[in-house]
Image: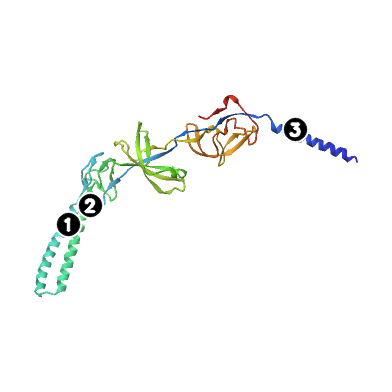
Amino acid sequence: MRLAPIALLLLLTACGGEDAGRKKDAGPPATVTVVTLASEPWRDSIDAVGTVKARNSVVIAAKQSERIAAVRFESGQRVAKGQVLVELDAGTVKAELAEARAALVDLEAQVVRLRDLQSRQLVARSQLDTAVAARNAAAARVQAAQVRLDERVIRAPFGGVLGLRLVSEGQFVNAGAAMVNLDDLERMWVDFPVPENRIAELETGMTLELAADAYPQRTFRARLAGIDSRVDIDTRAVMARAEIADSEGLVRPGMLVRVSLQREAADALVVPELALQQVGNRTFVYLAAADGTAVSRDVTVGGRRDGKALVLNGLKAGERVVLDGTSKLRDGQKIAVAPAAAKVAP
């Protein structure tokens, strides 16, 4: 019987402690400012950094190790297709060609003579066939010597602009050694990466704008010419290529340019970036619910510009998004909206 009053006392103490804990947890409401979502025109863009490349670009090099007999170009010169650039010493090859031609003339005469004798059945057919085979082998040697001679004359494979001259007359060069760069500056490309989640927005023929640090007052235009067939597994981006419409010779291969692909303006939901919360891989905002509490909502964000972010899904027009006061806010907490800051997003 004495245990009953003690149990009652403990029960009342526990209830009182729970009420006090609830009052302590409740606390005063957090003061926040909100914006009411409304649709607004949004012009999305894909921005990247690209590298300029010449449509045709090659390093002029010798196929043979030989001494340079003559250099027929100067640094920065514009050349036409087939124009002679460098002549290598060809004395030995010319002698081999002359010898091969002389042997061919002699063997041709033998074939003519044996063919006449064989027609009168004065020699065996096999003797004529042997002479014909020797004549054909000599003709092949003449052709091979002519090819070696032609390789001593290095020509421009296409029209373009030469780079810096790297060789001089009388210099001995090894096979494969660079002598000068040749670039076709009439048609230029720019290659740039695009995130894989934006691939569906790309379409061949789209217009792009290019900006280069070397020409801060100029904007170059380009046309999307193609998209790579694979996505890079490390960067999760696909390489796109655009053809520069008219660079006027200003844009050079190897330059870095800022690429901007503008899309048509469309109405969309936009929130200030200040309202976005990021915890791990989760992106969310706090909404001001009708019961006066803060409710978190996951969102998917698209492009960002000028302190604003495009919301692809998760929100709808008319909802109130908490803008300021989110640093210590938690889901379900009571909030008090500051009247002066309540406004409609532009």
Tell whether label 3 touches label 2 (CB within 8 Å).
no
For the residue labelled by badge 2, is the local secondary structure a helix, a strand or a loop? helix
Alpha-carbon span between mark 2 and mark 1: 13 Å
Q: 319 above or below 227?
A: above
Q: Earlier in the sequence, mark 1 or mark 3?
A: 3
Q: For mark 2, what is the residue? A: 151
User: Residue 146: which disc?
Assistant: none
Who is closer to the viewer here, 99 or 45? 45
Q: Earlier in the sequence, mark 2 or mark 1?
A: 1
Query: Which amino acid type is shown beneath numbered disc 2?
Result: Glu
Who is closer to the viewer here, 136 or 29? 29
| Disc nearest the viewer among 1 and 3 | 3
What residue is rendered at 78% in x and 36% in y?
Answer: 15
Query: Which amino acid type is shown beneath numbered disc 1?
Result: Leu
How far across and how far down the image is residue 132, in percent? 16, 67
Horizontal side, residue 109 vs residue 92: left or right? left
How far across and how far down the image is residue 86, in percent? 22, 46
What residue is rendered at 11% in x and 65% in y?
Answer: 109
What residue is rendered at 9% in x and 72% in y?
Answer: 117
How far across and how far down the image is residue 300, in percent? 53, 40
Q: For mark 1, what is the residue? A: 97
Horizontal side, residue 285 vs residue 155: left or right? right
Q: For mark 3, what is the residue? A: 20
Alpha-carbon span between mark 2 and mark 3: 97 Å
Query: Which amino acid type is shown beneath numbered disc 3?
Result: Ala
Q: 82 above or below 140?
A: above
Tell whether label 1 touches label 2 (CB within 8 Å).
no
For the residue labelled by badge 3, is the local secondary structure a helix, a strand or a loop? helix
How far across and how far down the image is residue 98, in percent? 15, 57
